[in-house]
Every structure is written in C-alpha cells, then in structure tokens.
Amino acid sequence: METLLENAVRGIPTGCVFALLAVGLVLTYKTSGVFNLAFGAQAYASAAVFYVVRKDHEWPLLWAALLAVVVVGPAIGLLLERVLFRYLRTAGSMAKLVTSLGLLIAIPEVVKLVLGDESRKNPPPLWYVMRTDEWLWPRNTSIVLDAGQIATIAATVTVVVALVLLFRFSSLGLRMRAVVESPRMAELNGVDSERVSMTSWMLSSLLAGLAGVLLAPLFASLNPLDLFTLLVAALAATVFGGLTSIPLTFAGGLLLGVLQAVLAGSLPTDSILATGLRPALPFLVLFLLLLFRPGLRSTREVTDPLATVEAPPPAPVALVRPHWMTVGTRAFGAVVVALGLAACWFLLDGYWLGLVISGIILGIIMMSLIVVVGMGGMLSLCQAALAAIGAFGTAQLVAATGMSVLGAIVIGAVIAAGVGALLAVPVVRLDGVYLALATLAFALMFESIFVPLSWVSGGAVPLSVPRPLIGPIDLADDRWFLLFAVLCAAAVSAVVIRLREGTTGRFLQALQTSDVAAASIGISGRRSRVVAFTVAAAIAGFGGGLMATYVGQANYQSSFPYLIGLVWVALLVSAGARSVQAAVLSGLFFFLFPAILTRLFTFPGNWVESNPDAPSWVASALGAIQPNWAQSVAFILFGIGAITYAKHPEGSIEAQTATSVGAIVRWVERRRGDAGTGPSDPVPPPSPEVTDAPPLAGTGRPTADSGSPG
Amino acid sequence: MSGPLLEAEAVSKRFSGIVALSDVSLHVADGEFVAVIGPNGAGKSTLFNCLSGVLRPDRGTVTFRGRSLERLRPSARARLGIARTFQRIELFGGMTVLDHLLVADRARTRRGGLWSDLFRGSRPTSEELERCGIVLELVGLTEWADRPAESLSLGKGRLVELARALMCDPALLFLDEPSSGLDRHETAEMSATLETVSRQHGTAIVLIEHDVPMVRRLAERTYVLDYGQLIADGPTEDVLGDERVRVAYLGDNS
C-alpha cells in the first residue's frame, strides 16, 4: 500500500506534464476551433530557442525563459494566425486538422534550418538542480522531486486556474468562444473577431512555449519527435475533458500520469506488459476513451449559421470536361507513362532508378489514402502501420513457409485488410477529428507494442525478403522490378478508379456530403465505411509488401514510422485526395524531391571550390549552403503543401487540372466560333457532354487516371 | 382508411431540461395524408427525427406495420419503406440530379457493391434509367437531370429531395416543410406534385407545414403540436377551426 501510494505520488509530475500539454490543446481548440497537432512543434520551437540562448549564448535563466515563452511563443502564434488561420476561421474541422498536420511537419524543420540542426544533447534544466530531498523533505524518503518538476506542477496549476477564471468570469473568454462558433455572426454582434482571434492564438502559443521550455529537460536530447509523441500521449487527457472542459482535462492528465507510474511500479520489469504496455498506455487509454467516452460520438461539427453565404464548391473537373478531351488526356497520359518508363529504363543509374521504384510503390500506398480519405472522408493516420503489417506479413510468410514472394505479398495484404476491418468496426462510428486521433493512437500502439515483438517484426534485426522470379524474368534486376511496380500500380489504380466511379464510391460520396440524407435513403454509413477502410488497408498492405520486397527487408524504422505516415497524408491531401495521378506523383515527389534538392545544394559548394578567386562574400554566402538542408527544405515544402489544402480542398493537382481544362475548353470554343462551324451563340457555354455517357460514370468520369506517369 | 401503417405511442424526448416532445401519439394508415402543424419550436422536426430514427426517443414506442422500430438505425428504417426530406435541405455534393436518383435506386435495390463494381462495372441499366425518368417526370425535373444538384435553386433542390425520397419507393413519406423558402408559384407546384404522389402511388404522407392553405388542400387529418404537447388532432377542417389551435398557432383572425 505504501509503495502504491509512493508510486502514485511519483506520477504527479508526469501527470502535470500531460495536463499542461492537454490544457494547451483544449485552449487552442476552444478559442480557435483548430485541433492543433502542431502544438508540440510550437513547443519545440520555443524549447530550441531557450536551449540556444541558454547553452550557446549563456543568457541568464530569467531572460532566456522570457524570450522563449513570452516573446517567441506568442510571436509564432501571431504569425500563424495572420498568415494562415485567419483564412481558415470558417473552414471545416478537417481542413484545420490537415493544416495543423502540415505545420507539425514544417515548423521543426524551419527551426532546424534557422538554429542549426545538430542534435541538442542534455537540454538545460529550468533551474539549477536542487532536489527536494535536500531542502523540503526529510532524508530517507524515496520521493524525489527536482526543481524542474516543481516548476512544472506550479505552472500547470497556475495555468489551469487562470484559464478557468478567464472562461468563467471574463468577457474575453465569451468572445473567444463566439468567434469560434461563427466569426461572421460574432462580427455582426460587434465583436472584433480579428483581434479576438489574434489574442487566442497568442495565448495558446504562449502556453505551447511554456510547455516546451518546461518539458525539454525531461528528455536526454531535444527533438520534435519526442515532444510530438508526448503530445499524442497527452491527447488522452484532452479527450477525457471532452475537448472543452479545462478542469476535467487537468484531472485526466493527472490520472494518466499516476496510472502510468502505478503500473510501472507494480508490473514485473521484464514482461511484455512492462516493456510494451507501459509506454503504450497513454495511446491505449486514448483509443479506449475515444471509443467509449459518452458524448463524443454525437458531437457533430459546429455549423456556422452564416456558412451559406459562401459560394458553393466548384464542380468536379470531370463534370465540366467534354468527352473528346477526356479521351485526349488519357491518350496523352499513356504516352507520357510509356516515355517515362523508357527514359527510366535506358537513362537512369541505379540510385535514381531506386528512387523512382520506391516512389511508385509509395504511390500504391498513397492510393489506399485515396480510398479512405478521398472517397471515405475519413482522415486515417495509420496507413503506414497497415503498410508495415503487409510488409511484416510478407516477410514472416516467406521466412516461415518458404512460399513464393508474390503469394506472400497477397496474403500480407489480406492480413492487413483483416486488421483494418477489425480496427474499422469500432472506429468508423467516430466523427472527423476523433477518427483521426483514434487511428493515430492505433499507429502509436502498433509501434510501441507490436513492432518490438519477434512474431511481428522478427525482433531487432529486420527480416529479409528475397526478390521473386516470374518465369524467366528475375526481378532482382531493378529495371524489371520497375516494370513490375508500374504494372502493380496500374492494377491498383484500376481498382481504385472502378470503386470511385462505381456504386461504392457514390455511396461514400453521398455519406461524406450528407450523412443524414444518405441514411434516409437506406445507405448504411457504418457498412460502407468499414468496406472502404478494409479495402484501403488491403491496398496499403499490398504496397507495404512490395516495399519490403524492393528494399529486401521488412524494416519498420526506415520504411514505415508513423511520422513518415503523417507526411504521406499531408502530401497526398495537398496534391488531391481523390486523384490517382496525385497519388503516384506525390509518391515519386516524396523520394525524388529531396534527392534533387541535395544535388542542387551541392552545386554552390562545388562551385566555390573550383573558383578560388571568387569574391569572398560570394564564396562565404554560397559555401554556407549545406547539402543536408535538402531534407528540411523538402519537408517544409511538404508541410506548406498541406497548408494549401484549406484553399483547394480538392487538391492542387485537381485545381490545376480544372484551370487548364477550363482554358482549353474556352480556347477551343472560341476557335470553333471563329471558324463558324460551332454553335452560332457568341458565347457558347462549355457544354458538358454528359448525355453521351451514363451519368454514374459521367459525374466523376475517369480522368487521365488510367496510367501512372513515370 | 385501411390498416395502420405507422403507430407512434406516447413518444417523449427531452434535450437536457427542455421538453421537446411529451407523450405524443400519432397514427398513420396506409395511403393516408396527414399533416403536423404548430408554431416554430413546437417539436415537429424532433417528432420526425424520432420517427425516422435520427433521434432516439426517451420514452414511447414506434411501430411500422406492427413491427417495432426501436432498435433500427435510420438506414434500416429507410429500407423498410420510410423515406423523408429535410427542413434544412440536404443534398449530396458533386452529384447531378440524376445521380441523386440513381444512388437512391441502388440503395433500394441493393444492386452493386464491391464485387460488381470491380468485375461487372457500374453503369446504370436501362431499367434504372427508366425508373429515374418516371420520377423525374413526376416532379418535373427532367430537363435538369444532368445539372449538379448544388447549383439549383432552393425550390428545385426541394424537388430533388422529394424525387430522391420517392426513388426509395416508400410506403410512408415524411416531408419536413417542403414549401419553406419557396415562392407562391413553386408552392403550388409542390402541392400538385404531392397530390399526385398521394393519389397515384398510394404513398402515405406525413407533412410538416406552415402553409395553411396547402395543409387544408392536401391533408385528410391534422395533428397540432405546441410546446411538445399534442393539443389537437382530427379531420383537418375540424382541427383548423378549433379554438385552441387558433389561439396557439393561427392567431385569432385567421
């Protein structure tokens, strides 16, 4: 009993850490309507500033803390609000979530570029190290708190009390909530929503800065991934508070910390439970809370009563594109694919060929996102985990039975589909943001519980997968493997297109645009969504198996970590979540773009070396460009891409297609008018030839999707 | 009046303190045309939501053809033959008018699914197009069939909703204020269409409406709700002449 109590007390500082992050998230959500996954990234930015001024420039503690928390924190918030979230105030919660996903990827890379990206070991403690047993507690007690923990507890309690007071007694709190509900309505009632929104963002970002500075010393080195993982753990507390109640969130955070400490103290140290479950506990709690906390499922997105003043969304390209053009685009697409393949076959060396193959395989995994995100409207953040399941399945089957690799890939996809279906049954009942969080929790549970197990991943050393032989063709040759990958991508895209244009896709579209109306004509949302999720899981598993075959091993850390999965989602959604070309192009982009940037960034350095008589300022400016910036720059651009989602929810590729289709149609109509062969109408409307095609296929007629431009 | 189609007994619903419905009973016979009227906030839409399964009543029973609907989700009720429209119009984005009808038809016939999408293709058959054509003709949307439904006016949008509901071949149709937001001409057209549906197809209709002339013209019986209470029901003419109804809803001088 004594030890149980002691363990519980030991959990309080951790609990406060969770609570501080969770309260920050709730504050952002309450005051801006954004479920800010980038909160951890903002915390990282402040922590990095604190680290640099404290360690490198040896500022005094107070000034460093003030700079990091009171100046940098709110400044980031203000910047984000001014350049980004002010335009998103009336956007749906999905658009806001995707935007924060982009920021989550971009912000840490910006920080690394600005402040240097050498890993930061041993972040400075907030205060000189003084342990409580030396000045507060009698000796011989085993409960030890250091000053940082005490500061965390004090800060958390202060923040919670202040926020409760703000929302309960001040008119600012009320105005903040009004602006979230309906910025236009608030404006009409005399609230300056611009200013309120800026204040909200500065306040919540201040909290992010505070959290970053307080939490950084918990880790051996300062890196954004740890902070983000901690944030996801804290999400359990956020959900416990129902995303609105600050006191409940605080209680949830404390409970979580205590539970974790008690578990740690009472479980045998070497069992699976201790090694796997303990770190995964917050994710497990988050997952279970999402499924079983009453009141979450019924929370519909707040709809702005003035939302209808917006213009309706533009019609899909396929609706306005004439038939002749569809045929033309398809033919053009086929030619591009063939030429691209030939170019890869004859021109590329091993390195670039490898990147192209990886990109095409990733394109297949991206197609699973088309089914689940683009068609199903479910922002699944666990496709990387499902791909990993396919990879592990393939590797284990080959290792255990010696069966053919191709068969193993297919069975691996079936296993992934099974896991996907099991996950989907409880998860598809959840609405937008909650579904995203539940899948994220699943991805993290998978990473911390299952990946270390030897029957899943083969243990510490990744299982190897051989390249298959198809008749006389040995896929060990990368060029043949490229052809194989392209054929697989073509097959999968055919499946995706048929589903998208078919009844399955129509039902999903109906559900996505009006859930109640779809139910009113007898479409079961649960069934359709489970089917979509399962099909997507199968595609992801198939892609994962292919990836393992190409790489030669099922390597979780290098191929499928969950954060990479988030980058994939951001990339695909910004390119176009419904388009097969977008999937393949963003897969290629993901691998090729950083490599191309690396090439580009080596030019200045080489130039300086070969031109020793260049002016010194030119030499030093150019010499400063490092090739290892490439990854950062690429990720920043990927993140910025996701940010454009709010402007083009249909995706940049789709938007681009729409623009060019419109231009070409107008041009052709004008030419026809000049020649006098067309309609005599001076301004002939671009007449969609919907009549010549059956409407089900007509509304979302396959565009140039039929191929995969290589 | 033939056999009972829908029987709702003593349905009650509270929203955290506010009593939206209290012991409301409603009976609809096969092929009957019934109206539900009452001031805004009287609980009319809540009643519809309880009957169509969007909301679950706190107390009371709802049976359809003698079968309890209690545990059925809205989609299951729709498949039994209960269709509805919405007060705040609910159309599917990115679909043409014809697509709306085809989707509803596919949902009813349950033709098409994963396998047939993959192996047989999903082009509409001539029977499907014919069925859609009949309903389009009935509601007068034939020439709008290939337009994106979102781009239509509110009046046309309400007709699309009606057509979509009719594609389910319902035995019972709930219409939530089909004339709201429509001008006088459109309202008259809507009335005529509803009359045809009721007469020719024998569909039982429950209509929520503020437009008293429309109710008088169409409904055989009328229920009046006020503050969640049923204050009158009976043949439409009697109910509209009732003193309490005039005070609660119509205003004395109506």
Image (tube, rainbow, N blue to C red):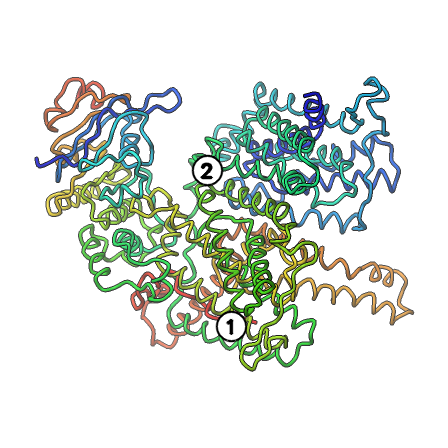
- Picture layout, residue A469 above or below residue B36: below
- Picture layout, residue A328 above or below residue A524: below
Where disc 2 sits, the SS reads loop
Q: Position of residue A625 (x, y in %)?
A: 80, 60
Task: Look at discs 2 and 1 and give the one toward the viewer.
Answer: 1
Chain of the residue displaying label 2: A
Quadrant, the C terminus of chain B: top left
For label 1, the residue is: A487
Q: Residue at x 23, y 24 (%)?
A: B10
Q: Position of residue A117 (x, y in %)?
A: 78, 51
Q: Position of residue B213 (x, y in %)?
A: 16, 33
The numbered mark at residue A301 is: 2
Q: Could you tell me the amino acid type at mark 2?
A: Glu
* Residue density around tag 2, few if under 14, some if 14–19, many if 20 or more, within 10 Å: few
Q: Is residue A79 left or right of residue A132?
A: left
The numbered mark at residue A276 is: none
Quadrant, the N terminus of chain B: top left
Q: Give the CA separation, mark 2 to mark 1.
A: 41 Å
Q: Residue at x 53, y 42 (%)?
A: A438
Q: Could you tell me the amino acid type at mark 1?
A: Leu
- Picture layout, residue B161 above or below residue A208: below
Where disc 1 sits, the SS reads helix
Q: Position of residue B161 (x, y in %)?
A: 28, 46
Chain of the residue displaying label 1: A
